[in-house]
Image (cartoon, coloured by chain):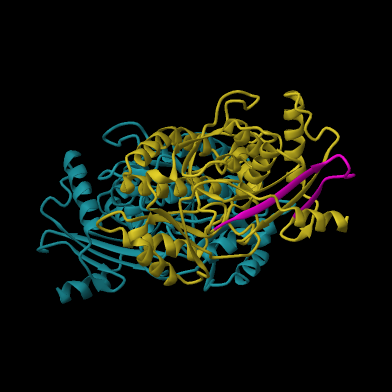
Chain colours: A yellow, B cyan
Amino acid sequence: MGNIATVATSPNIALIKYWGKRDDLLKLPLNDSISITLDNGVLCTTTTMMVSPEMKKDVFVLNGKIREDGKISEALMLIRKRLQGQKKGFLDGEKVLLISENNFPTSGGVASSASGFAAIAEAVCSIYGIKDAKEKSIMARFGSGSASRSVYGGFVRWKNGTRADGEDSYAVQIAPKSHWPEVIDVLAIISKKEKKVSSKEGMENTARESGLLPARVEGVKVRVERMQKAVLEKDFATMAELTMRDSNNMHATMLDSWPPVFYLNESSKQAIEAVHEFNSGEIKAGYTFDAGPNAHIITLKKYEREVVGLLREVEGVGEVVCAPVGDGPKQLKPDKKIVDYYLAKN
Amino acid sequence: MGNIATVATSPNIALIKYWGKRDDLLKLPLNDSISITLDNGVLCTTTTMMVSPEMKKDVFVLNGKIREDGKISEALMLIRKRLQGQKKGFLDGEKVLLISENNFPTSGGVASSASGFAAIAEAVCSIYGIKDAKEKSIMARFGSGSASRSVYGGFVRWKNGTRADGEDSYAVQIAPKSHWPEVIDVLAIISKKEKKVSSKEGMENTARESGLLPARVEGVKVRVERMQKAVLEKDFATMAELTMRDSNNMHATMLDSWPPVFYLNESSKQAIEAVHEFNSGEIKAGYTFDAGPNAHIITLKKYEREVVGLLREVEGVGEVVCAPVGDGPKQLKPDKKIVDYYLAKN
């Protein structure tokens, strides 16, 4: 415990997707979701947080630039309120210096917000000696729903819960990395451009406009149980098929929004077709797409080379990154130097 | 009445779509649909039919080529059975020479089967003196569901019905062309290539696999009544918005099929975005897409020039055709010459 912490976190890729909120501020979802946390040796957000009563205001340094960030301010507001309620007094008179850096492109369909907000929750809990994983997951959720899953490694399920205050909406680990370390995500970067429609915007549009979303929510209730079973039984074919079907199902509700939201482009479609062709006979890979065109191909290590090969054939694919399932957040030695550097600058 | 008839029919464009059957052979749909029959002065199928006890087998000449055609054989089988049941004896010992020609590309998303099978029904009814429009609509439906709507001009509704024998599943005219002659369909041909997935295949896939289709069917129940009201009240903004939403909704269920079915391509998406931009402020146009990438833009004559202009800006758009709402099938002078030509060839 101290007033400073440095943590390494990573994005997760959802096999059963989160799309649509029942509470916009608290980020309470319409349905359960299941994800794989990726190895932070490959995709990593390194975050240092310092709290101090001597700073005049919160300062956020994101990828080397001092920035205002409404989403981070909102998350810190909710965290402050929560800890005051628990009489921890955290941040009551104290301000935060947050320095966060991704080793991957942001806002291009790789969920940097998941690792970023998981990092904030990790750092807060480290500084204030909070060990409860549920607390961490809820604090991460305050920033971004999917961040609630990135506080664990391995295979993770975020329960939607039913309470209006969200106290039953947090993630749990369904299996650690060691259960099935062969699982990898082969990520094809199709576009590094900033998205036209943010996932927040797209999700709220779908929840407001799509007449199909309630049917998706009902469908997920069945799919999420089958997915958990497939993960626990290491039944890859079922896991991959459910992953593909759930991604298609979510993107269908996006198309049913108003105006319609398109995240898949021609390259995404080519990747989908390539995977279906690769799977003829036996399911060896499953595609999934978040709110962007980048293809995540969930497969097993033994197929990595073939999957990379088929993605390289797809027009418009740039970098291809292979990220195995990861161990979850890591505490690093607090980086006092970087804190001193930015304190001197302010 | 005679043993020969020549008719001119045209495709229709559905504002509320037909997608999914409750009976594959009888082409009974899961939901009602509403369409505009297009002017056969622009998009036309000219069909001559002769029945004769002297021919040895049915002969189909489609766009100048003698061809086998399973769908036509199936429709004729059902029509023969129906007329035998009504003791008309039609085609009992007689064979059919059918010569049909489209002035537009087939299988590229322009529904040639609708006008083709409407023509067969028209010709049969002309030859056998059947005046009942319901009979015509049911016979057209035997070949292709959407053909049931092309036996009328103007604005047409096809009722799904509930009977297993389909006797309550036929189209009715909700308003003639004269009610609202300003309505036009500006059709942008994006691809003349044969479709990868036929609409029959795509539709059966969706009905089998999509968990979202039942929600679409429920949604259409509301939308179809609102559409009929909008047509009767000549409320263009509502008609156009419902048209766009229903097209998106149908394509969403296609994406939720397994494997997913994509009919929209990048050009289609660009056309969608261009229409949304054109509509900012006031809805002046509505896009809709059948089982193909071609954009149908429903608008009013006064906006024709602007809509054509915006479509010409879309990458990948070829021909642009403007088809007003039409009057429906036309009986022409029987074309005996073409019959003699093909009889001599056989």
- For residue A286, side relative to residue B184 (left or right): left
Q: Nearer the viewer, residue B337 or A174?
A: A174
Q: Give the residue displayed 63% in from the left and 71% down from the top.
A: B313
- For residue A30, side relative to residue A4 (left or right): left
How many marks the image carries: the answer is 0
* Residue B85 in the image: above or below residue A83: below
- For residue B113, side relative to residue A288 (left or right): left
Residue B69 visible in the displayed image: yes
x, y percentage for residue A28? 61, 33
Q: Quadrant of the C terminus of chain A?
A: bottom right
Q: Nearer the viewer, residue B126 or B44?
A: B44
Q: Give the residue displayed 67% in from the left and 33% down from the top.
A: A129
x, y percentage for residue A218? 46, 32
x, y percentage for residue A152? 53, 41
Q: Give the residue displayed 62% in from the left and 61% down from the top.
A: A103
Q: Which residues are magenta?
A: A43-61
A55 in magenta = yes
* Residue A32 in the image: above or below residue A114: above
Residue B2 visible in the displayed image: no
Name the quadrant containing residue A76: top right
x, y percentage for residue B195? 37, 64
A268 in magenta = no
Q: Quadrant of the N terminus of chain A?
A: top right
Q: Nearer the viewer, residue A68 or B252?
A: A68
Q: Nearer the viewer, residue A78 or B312?
A: A78
